[in-house]
Image (cartoon, helix red, strand yellow):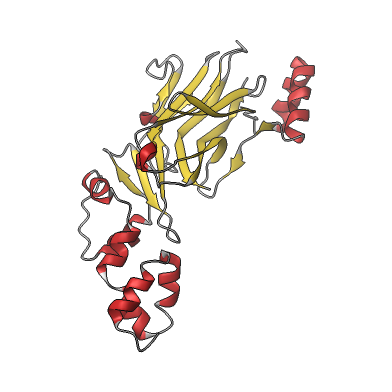
Amino acid sequence: MERLPVGCVSAILSETSPEDVFRLSAVSTTFYSASEWEFIWEKFLPSEYRDVVSRSAEPLKPSTKKELFLRLCDPLLMDQGRKSFKLEKSTGRVSYVLSARELSITWSSDPIYWAWKSMPESRFQEVVELKTGNWIEIEGKIRTGDLSPNTPYGAYLIMKVMSRAYGLDLMPSETSIGIGNRVACAHLAWLQSPSCQKQEMECQIYGHGVEMLRKEVEEGEVRVPSERGDGWMEIELGQFFTGGPEESTKEVKMSLKEVKGYQLKGGLVIEGIEIRPI
């Protein structure tokens, strides 16, 4: 390999992955020189990277495609700070976080039910908290063409359940993923209160229904929130496959709703929905 022209080595590297290129570039000066060729990183960048750069909330002026690739491996705010874009460093696959302002949240414009506010731990300027209401309906949308082709994805609601929360875990929520006119998946989710004392009190009041939910969680039939590494929690809304270029215009709809219980609830904070490769 050391005797091959650098251009040939670059062509070989372009058929691998970013992870392989980073690893091999540390092996020898030939691999390192070959790894600097622009067309390698042009190939690893998503096809619509110029559009992403133009919509960035901050000016981007990388001197090379490799430098741009590395910058996009860190979260990039775009569309007036309402979305976050990121590349997976090992593969170059695309992920997005849609802020709460990018979502359709029923009655979120009415301060009686929802409150918009800032939180220091959020990547976005605003999050939204359910103050009180008997109806939760949250939906996000994204085109398959904005994501990496032929790739399995998961969609996750990024959220917090505040210590003062109430009524969220009395009825299961419904989650779903739709692509075009087709429902890709649908599940039940339980927005558990972080307070064990509050859970026990609600169990005593509502009894059998809460106990049934706990049993379904233990059996894996109902999804529950899990801790993230950024101080938030997430609950999976579902999974889907993007398909090839012929599928690129299809719209993916991701939702969580609880519209059947009619009990008052509050204390749910929404940061957004993350769509990432799995």
- Is 90 positioned to the left or the right of 37 in the image? right
Residue 243 placed where, x, y %? Answer: 44, 41
User: Which residue is drawn at the image coordinates 23% and 66% (left, top)?
Assistant: 64
Farthest front residue in view = 246
Q: Taking the image as drawn, is residue 207 in sight?
A: no
Task: Work out whether residue 35 or residue 168 is closer to the camera in this orientation and state it.
Answer: 35
Residue 189 placed where, x, y %? Answer: 63, 28
Residue 10 placed where, x, y %? Answer: 32, 74
Task: Work out whether residue 11 or residue 258 is closer to the camera in this orientation and state it.
Answer: 11
Q: Taking the image as drawn, is residue 244 in sight?
A: yes
On screen, 156 above or below 11?
above
User: Which residue is drawn at the image coordinates 55% and 35% (left, top)?
Assistant: 238
User: Which residue is drawn at the image coordinates 76% and 21% (left, top)?
Assistant: 203
Task: Work out whether residue 243 or residue 104 is closer to the camera in this orientation and state it.
Answer: 243
- Is 38 positioned to the left or the right of 44 in the image? left
Farthest top residue in view = 262
Q: Quadrant of residue 117?
A: top left
The quadrant of the rendering that contains the N terminus is: bottom left
How many labels sit on residues?
Answer: 0
Task: Work out whether residue 254 or residue 214 is closer to the camera in this orientation and state it.
Answer: 254
On screen, 50 above or below 27?
above
On screen, 251 above or below 7?
above
Farthest bottom residue in view = 3
User: Which residue is drawn at the image coordinates 35% and 41% (left, top)?
Assistant: 146
Residue 248 placed where, x, y %? Answer: 36, 38
Q: Quadrant of residue 102?
A: top left
